[in-house]
Amino acid sequence: MVLSFHDTLDFQISTALGMVWFGLFWFVTIRVPLITGWRFDNNDYYALSFSLLQFSHFSYQQDRFSPPSSTSSKHSYARKRSIP
């Protein structure tokens, strides 16, 4: 199976978004408590990690698989779905 340009671009974008989310998660869970002296209890930690993972997965699924809305560009959607 040969990957098209759009498939590799989607992979690069999802990888970059994953790195951003991991950096944000690291900053919030490790750096902020070290700087401020504030500590998480387990409930805060699990709730934050679950919400970040859920939001990142949901936003990626919406971007990749949702049909075009009336405000989005139909040309890019048609170009991704065209048969060569």
Image (spheres, rainbow, N blue to C red):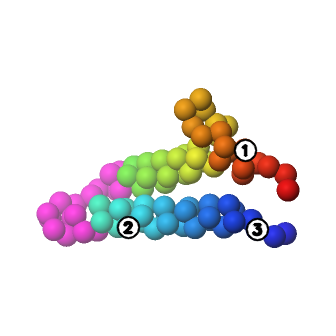
Question: Circle 3 is placed at which residue position?
Answer: 3
* Residue stretch rendered in magenta on the structure: 29-46
What's the residue at 76%, 48% (across, down)? 81
Report which quarter residue 21 is drawn in: bottom left
Q: Is residue 54 visible?
A: no
> How far from the left and from the top, in percent, is residue 66?
64, 40
Marked residue nearer the N-terminal end (2 or 1): 2
> How far from the left and from the top, in percent, is residue 4?
74, 65
Question: Circle 2 is placed at which residue position?
Answer: 23
Above or below for 54 versus 37: above
Q: Quadrant of the N terminus?
A: bottom right
Question: Circle 1 is placed at which residue position?
Answer: 78
Residue type for callout 1: Ala
Residue type for callout 2: Gly
Label 2, residues with CA under 10 Å away: few <14, some 14-19, many ≥20: few
Report which quarter residue 34 is drawn in: bottom left
Above or below for 32 versus 80: below
